[in-house]
Amino acid sequence: MFDLSGRKALVTGASGGIGEEIARILHAQGAIVGLHGTRVEKLETLANELGERVHIFPANLSDRAEVKALGEKAEADLGGVDILVNNAGITKDGLFVRMSDDDWDAVLEVNLTAVFRLTRELTHPMMRRRYGRIINITSIVGVTGNPGQANYCASKAGMIGFTKSLAQEIATRNVTVNCVAPGFIESAMTGKLNDKQKDAIMGAIPMKRMGTGAEVASAVAYLASSEAAYMTGQTLHVNGGMAMI
Amino acid sequence: MSDVAERVKKIVIDHLGVDAEKVSEGASFIDDLGADSLDTVELVMAFEEEFGVEIPDDAADSILTVGDAVKFIEKAQA
């Protein structure tokens, strides 16, 4: 099950916690994996650990020209991207009334616009080959909202709408487009929370613990597989029961 | 048949997987060759790439047959 031998995958944000686990599991299932990130050293460490079948693609997703170049380079170097995992994301939290234009723009640019642009680069070749898996890592807060994250929640909700539209347009080409929505996962992003915030979150999670990157990555491995051929336009929620949608 | 027409025909055959004899000048992509709306967009993109021309959306909407495509490209290249 979920064998990815010979498939070529590009994972954005592979220098971060969840992205790293996604890269690991796709690689373990046999895929040739392209690691995108901004921290080259972290990418190199991960690439060394994984060994063969790994490529590194550093790029700044805030820079539109770099996003385009990333798509072109990944398509060329990997010999066609079959699996695209749009995982990279940033936060610039703050209460809405004091949220600056810059904080809004920066989050939307990386979390949503870069997804649109990179996906556009890679979708057409997938359509031509009549096979593709596009997996967008959204967030539970894109569905529920979260105080202090108007920009982040808007970007993640936007990703879900983007996924549903694209899924409908290209379903006949055997290119599926789905989301995975993590809840609270142990990562640098949730590491910024203080203990009081963490306690409040635990109270809302039936499992009474944070999830792991590997638990999110498992859902990605399923959606990336040929077994998931009939799943498209969906959002898989991996959140310990925190929200049941 | 002109060089442009030959190349257009080849793209249409490759992309839609249809028999060469079906791809006449008057053949409609959708009605005669079984293309869907996504195919027509892909064909336009393939023509742009092959001939290095830009086909704006309103012009693309009026390219319904193989002959329409050939005429547009020949005019754009002239």
Image (cartoon, coloured by chain):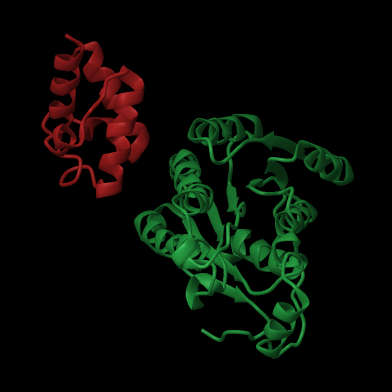
Give the colour of chain A.
green
Q: Position of residue A138 (x, y in %)?
A: 55, 64
Residue furthest out toward the top? B78
**Residue at 30%, 20% in the rendered image:** B7
Percent position of residue A159, x then y: 46, 60
The quarter of the picture where the N terminus of chain A appears is bottom right
Q: Residue A19: give x, y in percent of width and height.
A: 70, 55
How many numbered marks appear? 0
In this view, the residue in front, A227 or A241, is A241
Considering every residue shown, the one lying at the far front of the view is: A98
- Answer yes or no: is residue A232 visible: no
Give the side of residue A147 with respect to residue A190, left or right. Answer: left
Image-quadrant location for residue B12:
top left
Residue A5 in view, yes or no: yes
- Colour red belongs to chain: B
Camera-side residue of A227 and A61: A61
Front residue (pair B2, A103): A103
Point out residue A180 in the picture as x, y percentages from the top left corner: 58, 67
> In the figure, A226 relative to B42: above or below?
below
Location of residue B41 by image quarter: top left
Q: Residue at x 55, y 54 (%)?
A: A133
A195 relative to A123 in the view: left or right: right
Q: Is residue A63 above or below residue A176?
A: above
Q: Give left or right: position of B23 versus B62.
A: right
Write the residue at 25% across / 12% down.
B3
